[in-house]
Image (cartoon, rainbow, N blue to C red):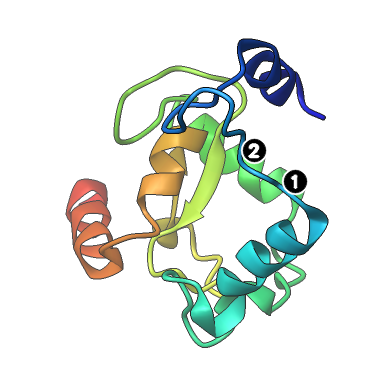
């Protein structure tokens, strides 16, 4: 049981539940929840793009050079970090062109999975 669940169990409640009515997170329930969010059922599904492998050009040296180019700054929130993600602007892993890559913090990178067309336009303008 997770620490959070232990705390809820001790309190006799969980957020959104009446006292004493602890949700039953059984393995079966977790499996069903997971299946609802996998593959084509996931809101971010894009014809299996995420399952395609990265090309040989995608190296540690390439990603580090993009981080250096962007001065280790997230290009959305401007947070400075040595641990930034390198994002493909056109969402195509095969396109490792330097003009198609940009640095983002983990939080901002997760936001870019929604409204992809808008984010693509935003980043293309930013790099010009």
Nearer to me, 45 or 100 = 45
Q: Is 27 on the left-hand or right-hand side of 24?
A: right
Nearer to me, 58 or 46 = 46
Question: Image quadrant of residue 59?
Answer: bottom right
Q: Position of residue 115 (x, y in %)?
A: 25, 63
SS state under label 1: helix
Say above or below: 99 vs 7: below
Q: Residues within 10 Å of mark 1 (few under 14, many from 20)?
A: few
User: Is there a contact, CB below 8 Å, between mark 2 and mark 1?
Assistant: yes
Say above or below: 103 vs 51: above
Say above or below: 72 vs 108: above
Q: Residue at x 56, y 41 (%)?
A: 85
What residue would you read off at disc 2? 64
Q: Position of residue 34 (x, y in %)?
A: 66, 64
What residue would you read off at disc 1? 60
Q: Is 23 on the left-hand or right-hand side of 128?
A: right
Residue lying at the far bottom of the rendered structure:
47
Say above or below: 101 vs 74: below
Q: Position of residue 1 (x, y in %)?
A: 82, 30
Question: Image quadrant of residue 5?
Answer: top right
Q: Position of residue 8 (x, y in %)?
A: 63, 19
Q: Residue at x 45, y 17 (%)?
A: 80
Q: Residue at x 26, y 58 (%)?
A: 119
SS state under label 2: helix
Distance CA(mark 2)–CA(mark 1)? 6 Å
């Amino acid at each position: 049981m997770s620490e959070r669940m232990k705390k809820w169990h001790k309190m006799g409640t969980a957020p959104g539940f009446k006292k004493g009515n602890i949700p039953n997170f059984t393995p079966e329930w977790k499996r069903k929840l997971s299946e609802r969010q996998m593959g084509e059922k996931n809101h971010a599904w894009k014809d299996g793009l995420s399952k395609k492998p990265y090309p040989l050009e995608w190296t540690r040296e390439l990603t580090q050079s993009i981080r250096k180019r962007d001065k280790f700054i997230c290009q959305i929130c401007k947070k400075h970090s040595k641990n930034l993600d390198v994002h493909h602007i056109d969402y195509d892993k095969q396109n490792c062109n330097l003009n198609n890559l940009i640095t983002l913090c983990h939080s901002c990178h997760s936001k870019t999975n929604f409204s992809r067309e808008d984010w693509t336009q935003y980043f293309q303008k930013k790099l010009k």
